[in-house]
Image (spheres, helix red, strand yellow):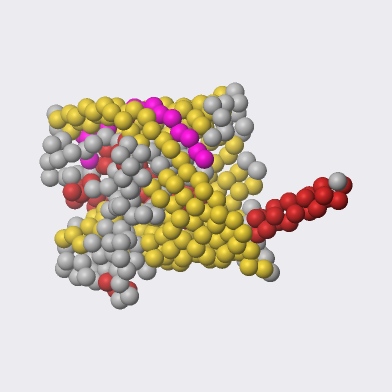
Amino acid sequence: MKKTLLAAALLAGFAGAASAQSSVTLYGILDAGLVYKSASYNGNTINEFGMAYGTQSGNRLGFKGVEDMGSGNRLTFQLENGFDIGNGTLGQASRLFGRQAWFGVENDAWGYARMGRQLNFASDYFGAIDPFGQGFAQANIGNSFGTTNTYRLSNSLKYQTPVMGGFQAGVMYSFATGIDSVVIAGGKADASGTGYNYASQDNTRQISLGAKYANGPIYVAASYDKLYGASNFVGGSPDASPSEWNLGASYDFNVVKVSAAYAQTRGGMMGNQGNAQGNSGASISSSVLPGLSAGLANGVNIFDQNFGFNSYLIGLTAPIGGASKVFGSWQMAMPNGNMQEAYNASNASTYSLGYQYDFTKRTNAYAYVSYANNYATINGLTSTVLGVGLRHQF
C-alpha cells in the first residue's frame, strides 16, 4: 500500500513538472452594462440610452502558451480575440485575433523578442498611470494621449529588456501598421489595411520606444511613437510625419495613489485622440457635426502638418475598505497655434469620476461619469457619458 501511494505521488510530481514546462492557458473577460450619452454642438443635441459592452475592459477570449526550449529559453505566444458580447460579432475590424496575435522567444537573462500584432510601448507602460486603467470610454487616458489607448501594430517586431534594478525598456518596429490613415492635404487611402506589402514604401510604418521604472510606490514611464507615411497615398507621400512622446509617473501613498502625465503630439495624430470612446462614448453623428464626422472616425491615424497639441493628465485613486475604490482624472488636450488657426481648435478638457466594487477577485461592478468640454478640440462641442456595468474575468 505504501509503495502504491509513493508511486502515485511520484507520477503526480512528474506530471506537474511537465505541465509547468509546456502549457496553454485559456482566459477571457466579459463586460456589459448600461450607458447614457449626450452630445451638443451649435444648438443640436443628441441623447441616447442603452446597453454598452466592453466599457471597463474590452470583451475578449484568448490563449497564452509557453514551451521550455532549454538553457533558460522559452517559446511563448498569445492569440487574443475581441468581440461584441451584445451580438457575438468580431471586433477590431472583424479580425479573428484582432486584439493580439504574436509569438516569440524569451529568457530571464536577456528579455523577450516577439513578432506579430502587438501593443505599442505607450499602451504597455501607461495603463499603470491612468486611474481608469485605459478603459471607461471617454474617461480613458487615450482621450488626450492617443498612443496609450491600447494602440495595436500589425506586422511588428518587438524587443523588451529584462527588469534591471526596477528599470525596463524596449523598441518596436511595424513594417505595415494595419491602421487606416487619412492625409488631410492629399485625400484618403488605406495604405496598410489588414494585409502586408513587401515594398515597404507602400506601407504605413511605425516605430515605438518605451522605458519604465518601478520601485515600491514609485512608477515612472516614458514612450515615443513616430509614423512614416506610405508613398501610395493619393498625391504621394504625406508631407507630415505624426509623432507623440509621453512622460508620466505615479506615487502610491496607500491611502491615495496620485498620477500625472504630459505629452506632445505633432504632425497629425495616432489612435485619434479626442475620439477614444468606442461604443460606450457619445455618438458624434453627422446630424450633430455636419461635415466633421469623417474626420472623427474611430481608430484612424491622421497625417496633417497643422495638427499639434500638448496633453495633460492628473489622476487620483483611493481604496475604500478592502473591496472597493474610487478614482478620477482631469485631462486636457491643448492645440498649438497652427492647429488653432487652421481648425479653430480649442482646449479640450475632460473630467471623469469612477467607482468599482469587487464581489470576488474575478467579478466586480462599476459606475462612472465623464464630461468633456470642447470635445475633440472642437469649440463648443460637449459630451457627457454615464454608465454602470458588471465585469467578470476568467
Whether the magenta-drawn stretch holds residue 388 is answered as yes
**Position in image of residue 339 (x %, y %):** 24, 50
Residue closer to the observer: 85 or 257: 85
Residue at 50% across / 38% down in the picture?
A: 393
Residue 48 visible within the image: yes
Q: Quadrant of residue 201?
A: bottom left
Residue closer to the observer: 353 or 267: 353
Judged from this view, the residue extending furthest toward the right is: 2
Q: Quadrant of residue 305?
A: bottom left
Residue range (magenta): 378-394
Q: Is residue 268 left or right of residue 9?
A: left
Number of disc labels: 0
Residue 262 visible within the image: no
Residue at 86% across / 46% down in the picture?
A: 1
Reply above or below: 102 against 55.
Answer: below
Reply above or below: 229 against 280.
Answer: below
Residue closer to the observer: 154 or 361: 361
**Position in image of residue 394 (x %, y %):** 52, 40
**Position in image of residue 386 (x %, y %):** 34, 27
Reply above or below: 189 against 219.
Answer: below
**Position in image of residue 263 (x %, y %):** 41, 49
Residue at 33% across / 33% down in the picture?
A: 52
Judged from this view, the residue extending furthest toward the bottom is: 199
Residue closer to the observer: 71 or 334: 71
Whether the magenta-drawn stretch holds residue 150 is answered as no
Residue at 42% across / 45% down in the picture?
A: 60
Q: Is residue 218 left or right of residue 381?
A: right
